[in-house]
Image (cartoon, rainbow, N blue to C red):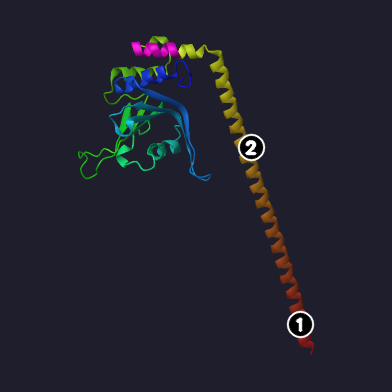
Amino acid sequence: MVSHPDTGESFIREILQIIFKKSFERLVVRPQKVYYGSNTDKHGARLDVYLEEVDDAVPGGAIVYDVEPDQNEDEESKAALPKRTRFYHAKIDAQSLKSGEHYRSLKNVIVILITPYDPFGLNRMVYTIRCQCVENPEMNYDDGACTMYLYTKGTEGNPPEELKQLLYYMENTKVENANSEALQNIDRMVNRIKMDGEVSLEYMKIFEREEMLIRKGQEMERQNTEREKQRADTAEQRAARAEQEVEALRKELRILKGREEKSQAIN
């Protein structure tokens, strides 16, 4: 949706306006923004939807938003969510401060994960995470970093009604669930994209490429496993042969020792 040249910016603007209950006028949209690792052995990051709200009154002249729909609900992925978002913050921060600029120019960053699973088990629709002082939680400590987890099926808390409707619509994308003007706009854009043959074709190409990469990765893993197995089998065979050779040497030594003892007895 966000990648579409005609509707992408309008689509994500509507979503942000519902989440934050404010208008977004000067918005820069960059879907699938990639941060490469600082070296070939370092981890990179691919942000699903990178946005900058241009605002001369805030540090760095813009607020950065990273919107990440996520369906990785296995326990290992859920447990890693806080460190994953910490890594996203770090990658964005590292690229948003130019050489020679003061730290006060560092842009504010908000990472938003939208999930169909409960990331923390409290059944909240909204989890907003900010840094705070452990000894005095009320003390003001604003480092400009914020993470929001939006659980589409959550019932606890008191989020705005339109946000509830948006998250329900994401789970049940039907026109009858578009209960506001903003959601109706979103629904029209969604249907337009669904009817766009070029988008469907490109999506299938992306899907096929990802499937190909997955299959290639699985094949490489299978080959690596097979090689490791062959190495293990070879090592086991070598060890068995070595043990046989040692046992043969011991047997030969026993025979020689026996002959020597007989010779000494005769003498």
Residue 108 position, x and y percent, is 32, 34
- Choose the circle earlier in sequence order: 1 or 2: 2
Circle 1 crowding by C-alpha within 10 Å: few under 14, some 14–19, many from 20: few
The residue sitting at the front extreme is 100
The residue lying toward the viewer, choosing from 76 and 244, is: 76
Dividing the picture into quadrants, the one containing residue 76 is top left
Side of 259 relative to 66 (left or right) = right
- Residue kind at label 2, given as amino acid type: Glu
- Residue at coordinates 42% horizontally, 24% vertically from top-left? 29
The residue sitting at the top extreme is 176
Q: Name the residue under label 2.
A: 219
- Residue kind at label 1, given as amino acid type: Glu
183 magenta-colored: yes
Q: Name the residue under label 1.
A: 260
Q: Which mark is residue 23?
A: none
- Residue at coordinates 78% horizontally, 80% vertically from top-left? 259
Image quarter hosting the C terminus: bottom right
14 magenta-colored: no
Side of 252 relative to 183 (left or right) = right
* Picture layout, residue 129 above or below residue 231: above
Region in magenta:
180-189
Q: Are marks 1 and 2 in contact (CB under 8 Å)?
A: no
Residue 23 position, x and y percent, is 31, 19
* Picture layout, residue 55 above or below residue 84: above
Circle 2 crowding by C-alpha within 10 Å: few under 14, some 14–19, many from 20: few
Q: Main secondary structure of the magenta part?
A: helix
- Residue at coordinates 74% horizontally, 79% vertically from top-left? 257
Element on which disc 2 rests: helix
Residue 187 in sight here: yes
Element on which disc 1 rests: helix
Dividing the picture into quadrants, the one containing residue 79 is top left
